Amino acid sequence: MTALTRAAACLVLFLAPACSRADEPKPGPSRSGNGDAPPTAKPAVLAELRADLAAERHPSDGGGRAWLVLAEGEDGHARVGRPQSWTFRYEVGPHGLQVGGALYFQVPPFWGWSTPQPTREQAPGFTLVSCEAEGVELTPRTLQRTLLQVEIGGRSLEEGEHIDLTYGAGPAGALPDQYAERGSLFLFAVDGDGDGIRGRIEGCPTIDILPAQAAMLVAHLEATARPGGPVRLTVAVLDGAASHGCEVNGSLSLRSHPAGFALPERIELTAEEGGCRTLLLEAPATGAWRVEATFEGDGLRFEARSNPLWVEEGGDPVFWGDLHGHSNLSDGTGLPEDYFRYARDVAGLDLIALTDHDHYGMMHFLDQRPEMWEEIRRQVSAFHEPGRFVTLLAYEWTNWIHGHRHVLYFEDDGEVLSSLDERFDTPAELWDALRGHSALTFAHHSAGGPVATDWSFAPDPVLEPVTEVMSVHGSSEAADSPSRIYSFLPGNSVRDALGKGFTLGFVGSSDGHDGHPGLAHLSPFYGYQAASADRKRAARLGNGGLAAIRADELSRASLLAAMRARRTYATSGPRILLEVSLGGYPMGATIPAAAVAGRARLDLRVSATTTIEHVDLIRSGALAERTLVGDREDLRSASFLENLEPGEYVYLRVVQADGGLAWSSPFFLE
């Protein structure tokens, strides 16, 4: 079980009703496109989510309040990798807490928080539970990895009485999250009358987590520029999990490869900047360029090499975006504000979407709490700067029968059309509700993972023109894909969908739950392995995902038009520049077979972030040709395809030596 699926199990357990109750509602029949439930459908999850909504709660359920108890001079902050202890106090609400009832305490179920446990004093996560009220008996027990139950005995607790929980009370303390964040949420819930139905209390306490010691440097250029035009370079000193905010003082030196890119010789970074800086430079002459950066300071030295930059006179620019990620409003890390700031100021992205779940997560849900959706909308508006940084209002339609999809609005407003709402709980109903809006959807982890896509619903040609082939879950492209998704479902890959005649462009996006949009592939928890100190082992990239969009300009309208025309391609995270044409037609094009009859020229240009291992040609469902490259980062080639027929499709897959991947959008013959 992956970290993400373990966390998902914890979230389901924290819902109000107990799963085993005989009177729980059972899932209704599937309404899939062909009448058959997809083999990966999870009706039990859907039933539990709906049962939670329908549950009748006693007035005492969810009553009371909880807070973090701080001694004088303490701030409660945690530091990544550093064990410590925290004391929380729960105060009983006006309706009391009866014998047989229970208090529930859940630490964040992601990325390494110690399990709260009441039995092994010397072990991490030992939790001491106490109550000064006379005659009250408390029985704590760990229900699951991050969930502690405290059952009430002896006598009922009355309003104003307290229960204290010291998490990390033993000598080993408790380990915090392995990612830095603001607002890490500790959940408290109360079953006040002992009927097995609990309610979450309002205003649960949070803790801020500071990054570990600086461990790496990253540098990102924009993808394309005009000679002499402006181009941004973003540099950031990060900890070993790619968290920012490292308080470092030192100097940054820059060099171009090849020589000829005018760069400042030395830049000073201060602790107040958190190790991040964005520079506005003048683009050099036409060609492929990279920047090499070195940071030295505080006894540390890090090197980084940027992604490639294409400087050219013509052609539409390429924009880098991460269209899929989560904050702690659902099952991710950090605040929405921090998510957008990281995307712009650390990852140096051009466009971003925060896609918190419609009805899934740690506390409350977007479809139930308008104030949460309003907070996302507020941050989308605050960070949106056309021409510099485009933000999209978005969410994840978390459907446990037909698969997860992302809804992106290319306009200022939009609704959360919940996957639990029977008006919108099939893909066709979702698309009908979105018709007339500047919006689109795309399917996620379609070939497996938590739940695969129900391809019996043909993607709407206007509202679903692209599909996500890569994320932290792995590749959904095909059975022969590198970094293939876990729990792969044969016959359900993106390539299988193309074989059904669906016309889909490709995008990647991270589905990061770490608060690091654009850089999920640098997290060791998604598979990243740094180079060894002696350089005998090269770095190996983890799973991630990015969308490259070739649009007229950096605006919502232009990006939407480009995505609907499938002028996109996907990577697993590294910013590989890729341009492919077939018979003069661009990636994603629908081509009349007569226009490429006989012999069609296929042109490829690629600039990678390290050496290219090979390039695969995929033609109509099969690997048609593999070209070994070996020792080059930049490649231009031309080849010819014979006898292309109507109904065929063609795309290229680029594989780097470090495991980085890129996929062109397919060409479709008609």
Image (cartoon, rainbow, N blue to C red):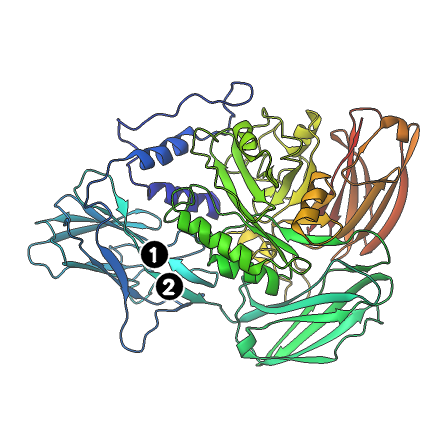
Q: Is disc 2 placed on a helix, strand or loop?
A: strand
**Relative to 332, residue 12 above or below:** above
- Residue with the mark numbered 1: 186
Q: Position of residue 399 (x, y in %)?
A: 48, 34
Going 83% across and 55% down the picture, which residue do you hit? 634
Q: Is disc 1 placed on a helix, strand or loop?
A: loop
Question: Neighbour class for label 2 at 10 Å: few (<14), some, many (≥20)?
Answer: some
Q: Are marks 2 and 1 in contact (CB under 8 Å)?
A: yes
Q: Is residue 141 left or right of residue 475?
A: left
**Relative to 38, residue 623 above or below:** below
Farthest right residue in view: 598
Q: Amino acid at mark 2?
A: Ile
Ranked by sequence position, the earlier of labels 2 and 1 is 1
> Taking the image as drawn, is residue 571 in sight?
no
Residue 214: name its quadrant. Answer: bottom right
**Relative to 450, residue 78 above or below:** below
Q: Amino acid at mark 1?
A: Phe
Q: Is residue 154 left or right of residue 393?
A: left
- Residue with the mark numbered 2: 207
Q: Position of residue 247 (x, y in %)?
A: 52, 76
Q: Position of residue 433 (x, y in %)?
A: 53, 32
Front residue of 193 and 313: 313
